Image (cartoon, rainbow, N blue to C red):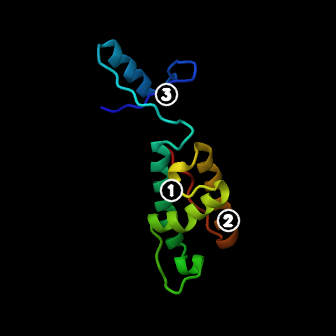
Amino acid sequence: MKLDLIVRSDGLLEAGTDESLAILKMINAGSKLSCEAVDSSKRTGQQNKALHVFLAQLADTLNDSGFTQMKVLKHDAEIPWTTTTAKENLWKPLQEAMINRLSTTEASKADYSAIHFVLSQHLASTLGVTVPAWPSR
């Protein structure tokens, strides 16, 4: 079983999360605990999942609004949007321009909100498309 646990800089567990409580119960019951340190300033696994949910919803929204990639990116063929093309042709170029990082693995937690906001504003003003809200659990 894999559970995520946040340990604050003062050495205390992040309070109130269901996973923290589950881990404490396991430790109290005599279970062994294996830890992996990760840089919490980078995007989380949950943010990565949310990014791909958002990109899939964005692709559907653009397709449903009649905006193929040709109409948005000025190509010569009518190409429907997919999660991958939304990521490669919309998200990543904007991310690179905003934070000078091309890989989504290099974006911080705060970067995701800022990029989503700018992308939403851009598509609303240029195409009149209201993009999906950022996914939550």
Of callouts 1 and 2, the N-terminal one: 1
What percent of the width, then of the height, locates residue 123?
Answer: 64, 67
Query: Which amino acid, by three-letter code, is at mark 2?
Result: His
Q: Which residue is mark 1?
A: 54
Of callouts 3 and 2, the N-terminal one: 3
Give the residue at x 59% y 55%: 101
Give the residue at x 66% y 61%: 97
Q: Which residue is mark 2?
A: 122
Mark number displayed over residue 6? 3
Residue 68, can we see it? no
SS class of the residue under badge 2? helix
What percent of the width, then of the height, locates residue 77?
Answer: 49, 85
Q: Up-down: is 37 above or below 65?
A: above
Viewer-nearest of discs 3 and 2: 3
Task: Kindly check if marks 3 and 1 are in contact, taking CB atoms under 8 A apart as contact.
Answer: no
Q: How many marks?
A: 3
Image quadrant in which the N terminus is located: top left
Residue 33, can we see it? yes
Q: Up-down: is 14 above or below 46?
A: above
What percent of the width, then of the height, locates residue 94?
Answer: 62, 62
Query: Which amino acid, by three-letter code, is at mark 3?
Result: Ile
Residue extending farthest right? 125
Query: Which amino acid, by three-letter code, is at mark 1?
Result: Phe
Q: Is residue 120 left or right of residue 16?
A: right
